[in-house]
Amino acid sequence: MELITDPEKIQNKSFEIIEEVLQGRELPEKEREIVYRIVHATADFDISEVTVFSENAVEEGRKALEKGARIITDVNMLRSGVSTRLSDDLGYSVECFIADEDVRNKAEDAGITRSMMAMRKAAEKTGESIYVIGNAPTALIELINLVRAGKADPALIIGTPVGLVGAAEAKNELEKLAAPHITIRGKKGGTAAAAAAINALIYL
C-alpha cells in the first residue's frame, strides 16, 4: 500500500473525494465551502445532508469578522482549533471563558454547568460577536435563552454540539431563532465540525 505523506497532497486528495461524492448536491458557493470543510473534518458524507444555514448566515458572519468580531467558543479545545492566521488582518479575537475561576464558582453556586455560565459571561461584553459551540448542548440552550431575553445579540451562531442528550433539541431551538446561524440537525456535530465551519468562514 502506497501511503500519501505530503500534507498538501493529502488535503487535495481528500477534497477530490468529497467533490466526487457530493457533486450532486446543489449549494451556494460559500455554503458549499463550509459544508466541504465540515465533511473533511468529520469524514462523514451524510453530515452534508443535515448541515443547514439560515438566510444570510455566511454574509453576516463575514461582515462581523471584518469588523473585528469576538469569536466565543464553548470549550478550550474548540478555541485552540480556530485559526488565528488572519486575526491581525481582520482584527478578530478568539475567547473562551469555561476555565475562568469566576465562571466555575458562579456555576457551582447557581447549580448550572460551567458552559452555561461561560455564555452568560460572554454576553456581558458588547460589540460584534460570533458564538461557536461544538461540544455542550447546555451552552447552546443558554445562549438561545440569552438571545430571547435580549441579553445577547450575536452576529452569527455556529451551533453544532454533539450528543445523545439535549444536542438535537438544542439545535432545533436554534433553528427557530431569527439570529443568523449555521447548525447540524440531529445528534451529529462536534468540536471538529464547529472549528471547520468557523475556519472556512475565516478563509472565504
Image (cartoon, rainbow, N blue to C red):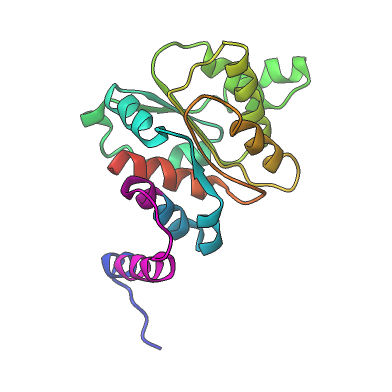
- Could you tell whether 88 is left or right of 165 in the image? left
Considering every residue shown, the one lying at the far right of the view is 111
- Could you tell whether 15 is left or right of 52 in the image? left
Most frequent secondary structure within the magenta stretch: helix
The magenta segment is: 12-34
Residue 101 shows up from this direction: no
Residue 194, image x, y percentages: 49, 43
> Which image quarter holds the C terminus?
top left
- Front residue of 199/148: it is 148
> Which image quarter holds the N terminus?
bottom left
- Could you tell whether 52 is left or right of 106 in the image? left
Is residue 31 one of those drawn in magenta? yes
Residue depicted at 75% across the width and 20% down the height: 108
Residue 87, image x, y percentages: 28, 32
Residue depicted at 66% across the width and 28% down the height: 141
Is residue 119 one of those drawn in magenta? no
Q: Is residue 152 above or below residue 86?
A: above
Q: Is residue 191 above or below residue 97?
A: below
- Front residue of 36/102: it is 36
Q: Is residue 109 above or below residue 188?
A: above
Residue depicted at 36% across the width and 86% down the height: 2
Residue 84, image x, y percentages: 32, 37
Snapshot quadrant of residue 197: top left
Residue 56, image x, y percentages: 39, 32
Residue 188 shows up from this direction: yes
